[in-house]
Image: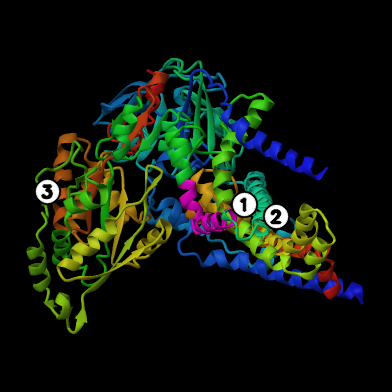
């Protein structure tokens, strides 16, 4: 019976995956505009009616969903109209940069948000808590585009401390150490923009959860037993306040592509967000399909992974299921 | 143990993201030029794989040379040292520079030029048309004669100054050039050799061709980098050349940058769906022209950094600009009078009504891409207010450019704010931006064929090889176009770039734009002479 119980969610995820593949196939086709119009209509190449017809016929070849599905299963994700390159290669080229930026921002924002949330909840009613909640509520309301542009203007334009764009100095000849330094310099501003966007939410969520957990009897018991305060906070209370944070972390990671789009575009960071932005601008249908599908499958995969992580963090979840 | 782990985290994060980051950057490469571009990706720099936009062509033309070229003053020798036109034989003769070589060391000869023309006939390079060339003949290794099938006045601009010459020994066996994916496709005769294009990062690397026939380039490496804010990259020293907004000219000057300004070769236009009521009536279009205040748009939307445009389409800086072209100085009373002459009357709320139907139009607006940069403005809002002030109800719809383009292309619009360059280049631009015969594929073309005289004049100017006679025809085209107003040219935005003079390079804007009118200050002569 247990094995059947394990199979059911997997089957549900497979079905959801199939629906997402269909969505990634059909949704980009609903976008107004097309590649030929986006690429040629405002260009210096003024096509005659015959030339346009010929090009449009080439790029309008329709492949059915069955064909698309069989290609996907054989890891043939198509060929970008604009880049003239396989989609797989383009995604794999951009993915590490997005992982570095988004992964780094999430880990930092989660780690510090969690610690700050736990500590302020423990010191509830103090000046530190009031100031923290007030400032984080304000910061939570600021969009990434605002913090991104503000950091760019202050630290790149006015102070000139950090580069304004890219992930590294293009074609510079570096020692490995200098290269790492160069990467870090380029990462500081986009990473800070994202950390400033994610940190307040993590802080407020953890604080809220902790306040609820600190009222529980098992925490009172732990205190009454005379355990060190740090152990009560983290081993007993914080572990139980972690579940909503994990959910948030999972969802944020799942929406990595769309989350990164704004900041990657501001800083010309060469990740999946920039790739998607450029693909949409020229209506590069195969590339849009590929990135949307990759992003959708990531949502599924992370959700599936979370089901198991929940059980590991809080055994009550496994027992309940 | 746990405390020490937490400390370790702190040390790691501080080390990676702050200490290293403040510690400085790599030493700059000697004789290296870096150019910022907000988009980055413009395709591979070979004739069949670069994007059909100005920046794509410029990426390619560092590698491939043309027969002639342009600088600030006009045409100059390139692969051809001298050239002449024989009207009797309808033939151009080009004498090639004997020092010209391909990047693989083989000599460039007249056979390569003949081959290029024949190859482009079989496999069209869409940037140019070689339909008007009947044949080309190699007279010895360094002389080539190109015979025209019929007179073709834009020959020097379109073919002489735009057509990249291909190496015969590389391309001859290639049957499908668009999918010819081989490092050999980048063997050209230009001043720089292509080395890398990183698609994800939007970066390009070129290296100087030391045996270039016009002398070794003044930079060893030429690098394009993608920057969301090119101006910021220039200001903090990441790049040496970038397009800038006009209001940033003074602050950048104070930082020691040199500011250069382009001629007025790009115009913002109000596209009109002249196939639809009431826009199909010339008087209604003229009323719109009278109702639109060019100067107010410039002041409110561009803080004064623009010049009112000629209604005849060609730039006021063009050598064939007709100063006698009709104008529509802001005159709302005249606009109202013209609309009333079409049977409209002011109804409740001061809006025009005819047969019980209100006069309501939709105005499409979007951020237009100029020289590769997406530019935001408030043109749509200002025009909406101007039209509403005379009694036309306007529904302003802001969309991204590709969607707007698609709707214009399919005639699914009333009015739309659009724009294009090339109006300082060859007068052929008039045909492309007016006639559907030439400009069917362009969303910026009015695709207006309703005036037979205009159609005839446009054909005539393509056949007239005498510049003075052609100028007279072009004058007349501008007059009729301004009279019929199938689209309204609004203004020429100030187009500026800034560069760091410390590298010893003097960048400039090309007279009439690079090739067919590309308004980008990246002329390869800046790095040669």
Please identify the quadrant where the C terminus of chain B is shown. Answer: top left
Q: Where is mark 1, residue-wise?
A: A79
| Quadrant of the rendered image containing residue A302 | bottom right
| Relative horizontal placement of residue B101, taking residue B436 as reference (left or right) | right
Badge 1 marks a residue whose secondary structure is loop
Instruction: Name which residue lies at 55% across and 63% down.
Output: A28
Q: Residue furthest bottom?
A: B356
Q: How far apart are marks 1 and 2 (CA)?
A: 9 Å
User: A36 or B399, which is in the foreground?
Assistant: B399
Vertical order, B391 against A59 (above or below) = below
Vertical order, B374 against B339 (above or below) = above
Badge 3 marks a residue whose secondary structure is loop
Q: Where is mark 3, residue-wise?
A: B325
Have a look at marks 1 and 3 and say if they share a chain: no
| Residue A145 percent location from the top left of the image | 48, 52
Instruction: Name which residue lies at 52% across and 34% down.
Output: A162
Instruction: Name which residue lies at 53% across and 59% down.
Output: A137
The magenta stretch is A128-149
Q: Can residue A265 be seen at all in this image of the molecule?
A: yes
Q: Where is mark 2, residue-wise?
A: A76
Which class describes the residues within 10 Å of circle 3: few (<14), some (14-19), or many (20+)? some
| Residue B225 percent location from the top left of the image | 50, 35
Q: Distance between the residues labelled 1 and 3?
A: 49 Å
| Residue B431 percent location from the top left of the image | 27, 49
Q: Do the residues labelled 1 and 2 touch (CB within 8 Å)?
A: no
The subunit letter for the residue under badge 3 reads B
Vertical order, A15 against B515 (above or below) = below
Q: Is residue B80 magenta?
A: no
Which class describes the residues within 10 Å of circle 2: few (<14), some (14-19), or many (20+)? some
């Amino acid at each position: 019976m247990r094995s059947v119980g394990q199979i059911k969610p997997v089957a549900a995820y497979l079905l959801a995956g199939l629906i997402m593949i269909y969505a990634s196939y059909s949704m980009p086709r609903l976008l107004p505009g097309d590649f030929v119009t986006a690429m040629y209509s405002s260009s210096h190449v003024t096509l005659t009616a015959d030339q346009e017809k010929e090009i449009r016929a080439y790029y309008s070849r329709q492949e059915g969903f069955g064909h698309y599905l069989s290609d996907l299963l054989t890891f043939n994700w198509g060929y970008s109209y604009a880049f003239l390159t396989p989609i797989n290669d383009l995604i794999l080229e951009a993915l590490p940069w997005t992982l570095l930026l988004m992964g780094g921002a999430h880990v930092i924002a989660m780690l510090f948000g969690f610690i700050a949330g736990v500590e302020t909840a423990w010191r509830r009613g103090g000046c530190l808590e009031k100031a923290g909640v007030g400032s984080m509520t304000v910061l939570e309301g600021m969009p990434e585009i605002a913090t991104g542009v503000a950091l760019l203007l202050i630290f790149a334009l006015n102070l000139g401390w950090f580069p304004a764009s890219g992930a590294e100095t293009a074609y510079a000849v570096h020692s490995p150490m200098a290269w790492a330094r160069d990467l870090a310099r380029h990462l500081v501003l986009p990473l800070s923009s994202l950390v400033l966007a994610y940190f307040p939410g993590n802080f407020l969520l953890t604080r809220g959860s902790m306040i609820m957990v600190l009222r529980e009897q098992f925490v009172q018991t732990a205190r009454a037993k005379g355990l060190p305060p740090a152990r009560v906070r983290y081993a007993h209370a914080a572990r139980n306040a972690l579940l909503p944070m994990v959910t948030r972390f999972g969802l944020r990671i799942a929406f990595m592509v769309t989350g990164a789009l704004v900041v990657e575009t501001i800083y010309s960071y060469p990740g999946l967000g920039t790739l998607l932005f450029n693909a949409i601008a020229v209506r590069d249908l195969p590339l849009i399909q590929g990135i949307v599908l990759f992003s959708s499958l990531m949502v599924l995969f992370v959700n599936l992974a979370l089901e198991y992580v929940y059980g590991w963090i809080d055994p009550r979840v496994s027992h309940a299921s | 143990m746990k405390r020490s782990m937490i400390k370790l985290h702190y040390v790691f994060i501080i080390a990676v993201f702050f200490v290293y980051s403040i510690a400085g950057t790599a030493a700059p490469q000697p004789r290296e030029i870096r150019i910022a571009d907000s988009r980055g990706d413009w395709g591979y720099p070979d004739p069949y794989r670069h994007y059909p936009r100005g920046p794509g062509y410029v990426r390619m033309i560092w590698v491939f040379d043309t027969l002639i070229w342009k600088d600030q003053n006009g045409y100059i020798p390139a692969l051809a040292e001298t050239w002449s036109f024989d009207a009797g034989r309808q033939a151009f003769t080009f004498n090639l520079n004997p020092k010209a070589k391909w990047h693989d060391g083989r000599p460039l000869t007249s056979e390569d030029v003949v081959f290029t023309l024949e190859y482009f006939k079989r496999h069209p390079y869409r940037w140019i048309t070689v339909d008007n060339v009947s044949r080309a003949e190699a007279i010895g290794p360094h002389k080539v004669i190109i015979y025209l099938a019929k007179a073709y006045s834009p020959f020097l601009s379109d073919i002489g100054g735009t057509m990249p010459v291909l190496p015969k020994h590389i391309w001859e066996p290639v049957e499908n050039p668009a999918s010819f994916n081989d490092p050999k496709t980048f063997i050209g005769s230009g001043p720089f050799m292509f080395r890398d294009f990183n698609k994800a990062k939007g970066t390009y690397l070129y290296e100087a061709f030391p045996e270039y026939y016009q002398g070794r380039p003044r930079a060893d490496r030429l690098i394009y980098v993608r920057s969301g804010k090119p101006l910021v990259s220039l200001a903090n020293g990441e790049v040496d050349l970038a397009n800038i907004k006009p209001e940033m000219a003074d602050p950048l000057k104070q930082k020691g940058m040199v500011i250069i300004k382009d001629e007025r070769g790009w115009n913002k236009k109000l596209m009109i769906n002249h196939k639809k009521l009431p826009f199909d009536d010339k008087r209604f279009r003229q009323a719109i022209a009278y109702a639109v205040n060019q100067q107010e748009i410039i002041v409110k939307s561009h803080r004064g950094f623009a010049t009112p445009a000629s209604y005849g389409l060609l730039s006021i800086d063009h050598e064939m600009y007709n100063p006698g072209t009709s104008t529509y100085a802001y005159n709302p009373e005249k606009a109202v009078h013209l609309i009333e002459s079409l049977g409209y009357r002011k109804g409740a709320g001061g809006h025009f009504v005819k047969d019980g139907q209100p006069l309501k139009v939709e105005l499409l607006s979007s951020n237009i891409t100029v020289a590769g940069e997406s530019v935001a403005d408030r043109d749509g809002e200002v025009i909406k207010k101007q039209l509403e002030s005379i009694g036309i109800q306007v529904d302003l719809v802001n969309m991204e450019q590709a969607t707007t383009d698609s709707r214009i292309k399919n005639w699914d619009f009333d009015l739309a704010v659009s724009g294009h360059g090339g109006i300082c280049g060859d007068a052929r631009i008039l045909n492309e931006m007016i006639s559907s015969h030439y400009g069917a594929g362009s969303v910026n073309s009015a695709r207006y064929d309703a005036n037979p005289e205009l159609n005839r004049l446009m054909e005539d100017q393509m056949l007239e090889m005498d510049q003075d006679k052609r100028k007279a025809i072009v004058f007349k085209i501008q007059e009729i176009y301004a009279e019929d107003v199938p689209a309204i040219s609004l203004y020429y935005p100030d187009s500026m770039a800034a560069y760091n003079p410390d590298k010893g390079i003097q960048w400039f804007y090309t007279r009439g734009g690079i090739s067919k009118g590309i308004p980008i200050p990246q002329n390869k002569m800046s790095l040669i002479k």
